[in-house]
Amino acid sequence: MQRTRFDVQWMCRCALAVLLAATSLTTATAQSSAGRWADANDPVAKQLIELERKWAVLECEPSNVVAEAVAEDFVGTAPEGPIYTKADLMKRHEKRAEASGCKLLGARVRYYGPDIAIIYGSETSVRKDSNGKPIDRGLTWTDTWLKRNGKWQIIAVQDMATPKR
């Protein structure tokens, strides 16, 4: 079977198009897996940080943030080490802890595609120890958010006590 010049040019163009498409797809995948920081005016990041603020001050300013933002299949790791669920959170917040000075110190959002965000942050509060003495409590945390059916939900958290300086 003899190939015409047109056939060879067409095959070369097709091969080039496939190569370019594969390169573009590989580059896009590499860029999305690397993630990107949300800019200061990102409306989704602002919304997620506001929900994080509500959670950070929950013991000082009660709200429905746990029911609103925490996924049913949520799993967290407490600063002391135990793993807990949304049901555990709901029970814990039924009885209000004595806390004051609750404050979100900062939070940064990093996206890993259109449906996953990791938020890195820290918070502080003043609580009472078993003798009733006020103690400062600082947490540094990493929260994982997933967008499901158009709604952002926290699916996992890792909390640690902020080291004393």
Image: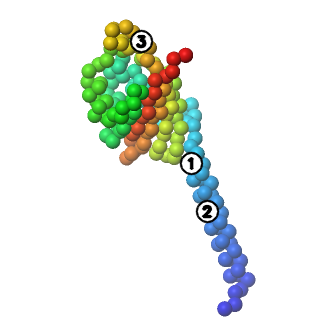
Task: State the image coordinates of residue 21 (x, y, percent, origin top left).
Answer: 62, 63
Q: Nearer the viewer, mark 2 or mark 3?
A: 3
Name the spot of residue 24 as percent of width and height, x first.
63, 58
Q: Mark 2 and mark 3: span between their CA atoms?
A: 57 Å
Q: Which residue is mark 3?
A: 135
> Pointer 1: what residue?
32
Residue type, label 2: Ala
Residue identifier under label 2: 22
Relative to the observer, which residue lies in front, 34 or 24? 34
Where does the C terminus fall, quadrant-wise?
Answer: top right
**Is the residue 28 above or below the residue 53 in the image?**
below
Vertical comparison of 21 with 157: above or below: below
State the residue at coordinates (38%, 14%): 127
Asked if the residue under mark 3 is in contact with the one under mark 2, i.e. CB atoms within 8 Å, the reply is: no
Residue 132, labelled with which disc? none
Q: Is residue 69 among the parts visible in the rendering?
A: no
Identified by mark 1, the residue type is Ser
> Separation of disc 1 and disc 2 at Cα?
15 Å
Q: Amino acid at mark 3?
A: Ile
Q: Can residue 73 be seen?
A: yes
Q: Are marks 3 and 1 in contact (CB under 8 Å)?
A: no
* Residue 135 placement, left or right of 2: left
**120 lies above or below 125:** below
Mark toward the start of the polypeptide (2 vs 3): 2
